[in-house]
Image: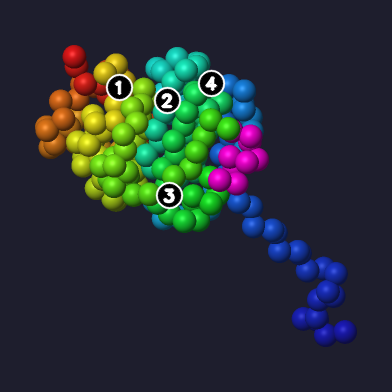
Amino acid sequence: MPSHFKPTGSRKPTPAKVANRVRLIGGTLRSRVIDFPDIAGLRPTANRVRETLFNWLGQTLQGKRCLDLFAGSGALGFEAASRGADVVAMLEVHTAAAQALKLNQQKLGATACRVISMDALKFLGLCEEKFDIVFVDPPFTSGLLAPVLMKIPAVLKPDGVVYAEWGVPIVDVLIASPSAQWEIVKQGKAGAVHFALLTIPA
């Protein structure tokens, strides 16, 4: 037998491709897993950042209406639903990501969630609903955080809060876009990610 010949049985099988996954960390859906596709700029909020965020918001969101403007993997929106939110509008313009959100919604039985396939700025210009909590986590290269923050006041309840996530300190974005008078209530940093909880002072 030639020395370079290898029997077929010795060849290692090619491992099956594993989907991108994120695990929910609290509430009724704790430890459930959601899958999401490979899409440039889609960056699920890390577990420790989500833990910090929901410590800020309170462990239960019972009765709250939430808007997840760049839903992506669904990590924030499904986490909100898991913690008792009455309504979670999950906005996602990318077709494959929106389809994955719908599949995860069905798998989790997350009846509080609804997936909306629409551009965030267009939605904010048309929406007549008001929300208690708005999650804003656009792709870092999109440049969308500042223009979105300018439009959010129209859909935010008077005592509502906004969670923002970006690649530079949130205060730098607010200084560059002063048209909406946001106040930073809490802020943090994890690796390259800066995040903050914002309100509009009364």
What is the x, y in percent for residue 165?
A: 33, 35
Disc 1 to disc 2, C-alpha distance:
10 Å
For marks 2 and 3, give the CA distance. 18 Å
Identify the residue position indicated by label 2 in the image: 65
Disc on the earlier residue, 1 or 2: 2
Which residue type carries mark 2?
A: Arg
Task: Give the foreground label among 2 and 4.
Answer: 2
| Discs 1, 3 touching: Cβ within 8 Å | no
Instruction: Rate crowding at label 2 as few (under 14), some (14 to 19) or many (20 or more) other CA atoms within 10 Å.
Output: many
Q: Amino acid at mark 1?
A: Lys
Q: Amino acid at mark 4?
A: Gly
Instruction: State how far apart marks 2 and 4 are (Cα).
Output: 10 Å
Q: In the image, residue 127 lies at what x, y percent?
A: 31, 38
Q: Could you tell me how far apart the alpha carbons at marks 1 and 3 are, in whole angstroms?
A: 23 Å
- The residue beneath circle 4 is 84
Pointer 1 with pointer 2, Cβ within 8 A: yes
User: What is the CA distance from the residue labelled 1 to the residue labelled 4?
Assistant: 18 Å
Q: Position of residue 23 (x, y in %)?
A: 58, 35
Task: Check disc 1 and report the residue beneath it.
Answer: 157
Which element carries disc 1, helix, strand or loop?
Answer: strand
Q: Position of residue 92 (x, y in %)?
A: 42, 47
Badge 1: how crowded within 10 Å, few (<14), some, or many (20+)? some
Residue located at (34% from left, 49% from top)? 119
Q: Residue at x 29, y 50 (%)?
A: 141
Task: State the residue position of label 3.
Answer: 117
Q: Is residue 66 magenta?
A: no
Q: In the structure shown, which secondary structural element does the residue marked by tag 4 occupy?
A: loop
Point out the stretch of residues depicted in magenta: 102-110
Q: First in sequence: mark 2 or mark 4?
A: 2
